Image (cartoon, rainbow, N blue to C red):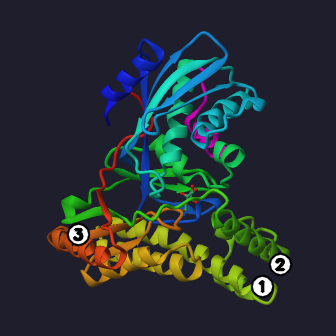
Amino acid sequence: MNTKLINEKFAEHFGSSGELYASPGRINLIGEHTDYNGGFVFPGAIDKGMVAEIRLNGTDRVRVYSVDLDDYAEFGLREQDAPSQGWARYIFGVCREIEKRGGRIAGFDTAFSGDVPLGAGMSSSAALESTFANALNEIFSLGIDRFELARIGQSTEHNYCGVNCGIMDQFASVFGKAGHLMRLDCRSMEFRYFPFDPESHGYRLVLLDSVVKHELVDSPYNKRRESCERVVAAIAKRHPEVEFLRDATMEMLDEVSGEISEEDRRRARFVIGETQRVLDVCDALERDDYQTVGERMYQTHEGLSKDYEVSCEELDHLNEIARECGVTGSRIMGGGFGGCTINLVKADLYDNFISTAKDRFASRWGHQPKVYDVVISDGARKL
Ligand code: GLA
């Protein structure tokens, strides 16, 4: 991350220097679209993220410069002061959500920049939210706990950015730990760190970015969530203990198949299967059984593509290429509708996989996929 550039830009715009805060994007090994269904996710923070330089300015206004967009925004801290630029609403939303929780903040100047590719499914927005939630919590000594910092980011998405997301991305960005994945139970919010070092077992984890931009706002993402809620409502009539799809079984789903649409049934079938796959993968990792991890990843891809329908032709193509190159596991990562596949590949097949994927993808789509090697890193912090 180029902190020197941020320092220069901050000085140029605000004439002095401030403190630096950073938060990462994330990967998710398995457990997609399970978070808002009370299920399990298995993410880790990565070595790409957002960095912001921040300094109090003695006013009640926030002045923000986005280094990457070369754009400037200024806003007050009251509800009616929302900025017009979409990118600035993430920061405004975090300020508002802190204030709604009783935290008192004041005006500040900030310049920020990131190296998480936007719209690639690596949670650049969660990285931005966590950076500011964590920074403002420290700067104003608010004493907000780390789960609440993650919830502040999630509520920002819901209330200011139009995405009814779950908690996975913000959780991973705040709680990340180098060399570890985190299995989070999104119903109880209990989590456990799992050491994760595929290289010591002869594997590598690599993301292939289709460069198809996914855009979650106003997208079918919220519709997927509504499908899940309709199925829960149908099942709960017979089984009142079912609060989330995570609590449901395939048998319960069969019982209500006459009362829900075929589409909703397929959506729910994916989620129920996916919750179990996360547990299978965690068990397999504890036995160093990377083969099973990979099989579950392919099953997840299949489900996300056919049942949950959040894939696209480019991502299905990348998955197909991975299979043909003997890659151990491959699947869409994140919300879908574009972005990346995550691939678990034997180290000795890596070079061939990457060059084949570049050539074959480019000959069909006119551009190469971008390649990101995954380094599992720490969460939100002051630099
Ligand atoms: C997006 C959302 C997350 C999660 C994933 C899908 O990244 O922000 O909450 O639902 O999609 O697993």
Mark 2 vs mark 1: in front: 1
Label 2 secondary element:
helix
- Expressed as whole percent of the image width and height from the top left, the position of residue 372 reads 30, 57
Horizontally, residue 314 falls left or right of residue 257, namely left
Three-letter code for the amino acid on which mark 3 is drawn: Ile
Three-letter code for the amino acid on which mark 2 is drawn: Arg
In the rendered image, which residue does mark 2 sit on?
238
In the rendered image, which residue does mark 3 sit on?
354
Q: Residue at x 26, y 61 (%)?
A: 198
Residue range (magenta): 141-155
Residue 305 visible in the displayed image:
yes
Horizontally, residue 220 falls left or right of residue 281, namely right
User: Does 144 appear in magenta?
Assistant: yes
Q: Nearer the viewer, residue 86 or 42?
A: 86
**Quadrant containing the C terminus in the rendered view:** top left
Horizontally, residue 354 falls left or right of residue 343, namely left
Q: Residue at x 59, y 36 (%)?
A: 88
In the rendered image, which residue does mark 1 sit on?
256
Mark 3 vs mark 1: in front: 3
Asked whether the beta carbons under mark 2 and mark 3 sit within 8 Å of each other, the answer is: no
Figure quadrant of residue 220: bottom right
